[in-house]
Image: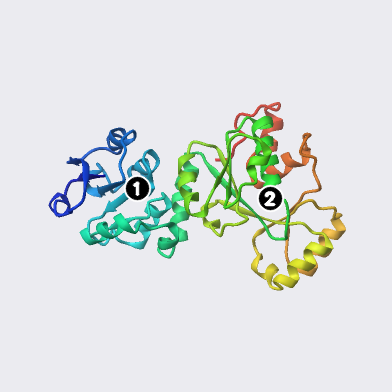
């Protein structure tokens, strides 16, 4: 059974020959719609976007995508240039709503053949996605992606250790998300979430009240979801040789990006040689760490990323207030 919320498209939606358990007409705030249906069971919600008060403000669509199951929503859009532009649709997709149309036939199709992210990924514009993320940064969140470049470079464990350092030493609220994997469960730590690639943006939006979101991007190409991405290289000879055999142009592709040497035993002289041979620049060098003890190097690394301010920490006598850079 389905739900229909209609306003300007009420006449169009009245021609739908489907089972309807509840129908609502008129204009309602996003909060009112969520309250009406958050505990209501239905198969699909056909939502005329003009029924959402101030629907031009994209944050009202976001409230609905967070409060209700976005996978069940079929969004009926007015057939205007603004609401059917790639820029506008990209923002809707970033909220996890993948079924949208301007016609009754489109609604009928989605009832039986709902889209997944793969079906709409070609529409999404990374520039618009960055705009959505920047709006989140203003509200407090900083989103850092970490991605292995060499095999087994340690992104998953490093994220766990950074999360623990931020929480225990600086009292910050942190969420860690891994994409298309389930390795986080072995750490037995709260607020470490596993999602598939198509639901990554939905998960990010859910946690817009968290100061820092760390994302393990190993099996994801969704780097545009992050404010900053760190690329991990484990610089042992065997790892580097394997990397170069796989992709001899890898350092050209990484030019201008933040390369982090992880589990590295390289000296300063070795790092200079590495940079010269790879025609690249190392952002930071992290030695092998013990995840059972406090590692001072992590504080320096977090300061380098810009998540904490070590200078302010010293000036304030070690207090955590004011450390987070906005």
Q: Which residue is mark 2?
A: 155
Q: Quadrant of the C terminus?
A: top right
Spot occupied by residue 145 in the image (x, y as percentages of width and height): 60, 51
Whether 242 is drawn above or below 88: the answer is: below
Report how far apart the C-alphas of labels 2 and 1 lie in the structure: 34 Å
Q: Quadrant of the N terminus?
A: top left
User: Residue 114 shows which numbered tag?
Assistant: none
Q: Residues within 10 Å of mark 2 (few under 14, many from 20)?
A: many
Task: Describe the element under mark 2 as helix, strand or loop.
Answer: helix
The way the protein has been coloured in the rendering is rainbow
Please tell me how many numbered marks the rendered image carries.
2
Mark before the other along the chain sequence, 2 or 1: 1
Q: Is residue 255 left or right of residue 82?
A: right
Q: Is residue 304 visible?
A: no
Q: Quarter-wise, where is residue 121 in the image?
A: bottom left
Q: Going 26% across and 60% down the picture, which residue do you hit?
A: 106
Q: Is residue 229 visible?
A: yes
Task: Describe the element under mark 1 as helix, strand or loop.
Answer: helix
Q: Which residue is mark 1?
A: 72
Whether 280 is drawn above or below 130: the answer is: below
């Amino acid at each position: 059974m389905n739900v229909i919320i209609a306003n300007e498209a009420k006449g169009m939606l009245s021609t739908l020959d489907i089972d309807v358990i509840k129908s609502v007409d008129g204009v309602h705030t996003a909060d009112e719609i969520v309250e009406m249906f958050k505990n209501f069971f239905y198969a699909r919600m056909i939502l005329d976007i003009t029924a959402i008060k101030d629907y031009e403000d994209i944050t009202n669509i976001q409230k609905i995508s967070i409060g209700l199951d976005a996978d069940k929503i079929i969004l009926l859009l007015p057939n205007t240039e603004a609401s059917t532009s790639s820029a506008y649709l990209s923002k809707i997709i970033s909220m996890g709503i993948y079924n949208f149309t301007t016609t009754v036939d489109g609604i009928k199709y989605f009832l039986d053949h709902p889209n997944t992210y793969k079906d709409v990924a070609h529409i999404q514009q990374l520039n618009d996605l960055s705009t959505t993320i920047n709006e989140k940064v203003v509200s407090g969140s900083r989103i850092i992606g970490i991605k292995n470049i060499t095999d087994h470079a340690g992104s998953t464990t490093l994220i766990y250790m950074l999360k623990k350092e931020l929480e225990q030493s600086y009292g910050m609220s942190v969420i860690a998300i891994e994409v298309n994997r389930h390795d986080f469960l072995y750490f037995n730590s709260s607020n470490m979430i596993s999602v598939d690639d198509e639901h990554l943006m939905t998960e990010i939006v859910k946690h817009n009240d968290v100061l820092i979101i760390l994302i393990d991007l190993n099996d994801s190409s969704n780097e545009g979801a992050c404010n900053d991405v760190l690329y991990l290289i484990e610089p042992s000879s065997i790892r580097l040789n394997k990397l170069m055999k796989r992709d001899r142009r890898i350092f050209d592709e990484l030019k201008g990006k933040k390369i982090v040497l992880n589990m590295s035993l390289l000296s300063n002289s070795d790092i200079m040689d590495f940079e010269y041979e790879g025609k690249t620049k190392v952002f930071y060098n992290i030695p092998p760490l013990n995840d059972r003890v406090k590692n001072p190097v992590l504080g320096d690394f977090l300061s380098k990323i810009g998540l904490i301010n070590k200078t302010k920490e010293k000036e304030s006598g070690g207090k955590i207030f004011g450390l987070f850079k906005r």
